[in-house]
């Protein structure tokens, strides 16, 4: 694939991922999402601020960004390049969500969410459905038992990273999928404050208001 095509795929996926769903939903309610709770525009912060319905809607739409970015990228390339397009679009969409240029144009600061929902959306495009179901079941169990959404995100994102390595080693995934490991790295970096809060016992639980 020519460098121009790669840059086009990356830019398109980035702009899709950068759509500030949480910011828009919060703004419609007269709230600046960056000034409440955890100070990011992700679904978890929207849930704490506006309740489960709006948080769930944010989660759904943010997940859809990951799916849409990858499906659109694949539509631009031959089938034998789908794996590469998938990885490029996934990484770009997550970067778009976490460091949104649209938010920068609106607020003057390059910021966004923490990438959890958009990352989960990418899973549905290349991981076998039964494995996705199993991973999501683990996510639900962790949230139900601990009430820590961040812990569920970190565990399942880490598991997907491990799964990608295993699938590549088994020959089920093309080696290019190893580049997908950039996604969990971004997610873990964006959750660094949550990791510290979890270790110190001060992380907010699901349902706690912002």
Image (tube, rainbow, N blue to C red):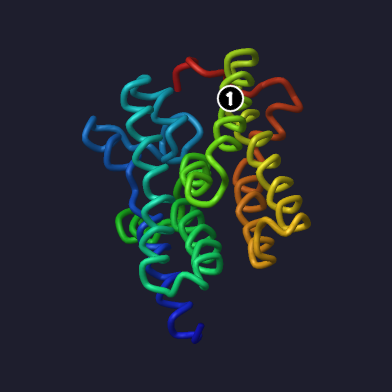
Residue pictured at 68% horizontal, 51% vertical: 164
Residue 133 x/y as whole percent? 55, 31
Residue positioned 42% across, 74% down in the render:
77
| Residue 53 percent coordinates (x, y) | 32, 22
Residue at the spot 41% in from the left edge and 63% down from the top edge: 13
In the figure, residue 84 lies in which quadrant?
Answer: bottom right
Query: What is the quadrant of the C terminus in the image?
Result: top left
Q: SS of the residue at dot 1?
A: helix
Q: Quadrant of residue 8?
A: bottom left
Q: Residue at x 51, y 72 (%)?
A: 81
Q: Is residue 143 above or below residue 90?
A: above
Against 178, is 62 above or below? above
Judge by depth and name the residue closer to the eye, 175 or 138.
175
Q: Looking at the picture, how far across and down is residue 196, in whole percent?
A: 72, 34
Total number of numbered discs in the rendering: 1
Q: Quadrant of residue 177?
A: bottom right
On screen, residue 189 above or below 198: below
**Which x, y percent locates residue 17?**
40, 55
Left or right for 23, reference 40: left
Q: Is residue 114 left or right of residue 107?
A: right
Q: Which residue is mark 1?
A: 137
Crowding near the residue tagged with mark 1, few <14, some 14–19, many ≥20 C-alpha atoms within 10 Å:
few
Looking at the image, is 209 positioned above or below residue 151?
Answer: above
């Amino acid at each position: 694939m020519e460098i121009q095509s790669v840059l086009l795929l990356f830019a398109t996926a980035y702009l899709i991922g950068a759509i500030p769903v949480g910011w828009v939903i919060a703004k419609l309610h007269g709230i600046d999402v960056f000034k409440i709770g955890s100070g990011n525009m992700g679904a978890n912060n929207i849930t704490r601020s506006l309740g489960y319905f709006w948080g769930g809607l944010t989660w759904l739409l943010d997940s859809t960004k990951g799916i849409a970015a990858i499906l659109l990228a694949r539509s631009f390339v031959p089938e034998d390049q789908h794996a590469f397009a998938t990885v490029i679009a996934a990484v770009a969409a997550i970067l778009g969500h976490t460091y949104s240029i649209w938010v920068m144009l609106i607020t003057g600061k390059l910021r966004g969410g923490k990438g959890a929902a958009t990352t989960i959306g990418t899973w549905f495009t290349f991981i076998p459905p039964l494995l996705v179901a199993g991973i999501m079941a683990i996510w639900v169990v962790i949230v139900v038992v601990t009430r820590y959404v961040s812990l569920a995100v970190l565990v399942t994102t880490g598991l997907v990273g491990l799964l990608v390595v295993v699938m590549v080693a088994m020959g089920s995934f093309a080696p290019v999928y190893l580049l997908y490991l950039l996604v969990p790295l971004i997610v873990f970096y964006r959750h660094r404050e949550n990791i510290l809060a979890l270790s110190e016992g001060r992380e907010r639980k699901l349902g706690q208001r912002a």
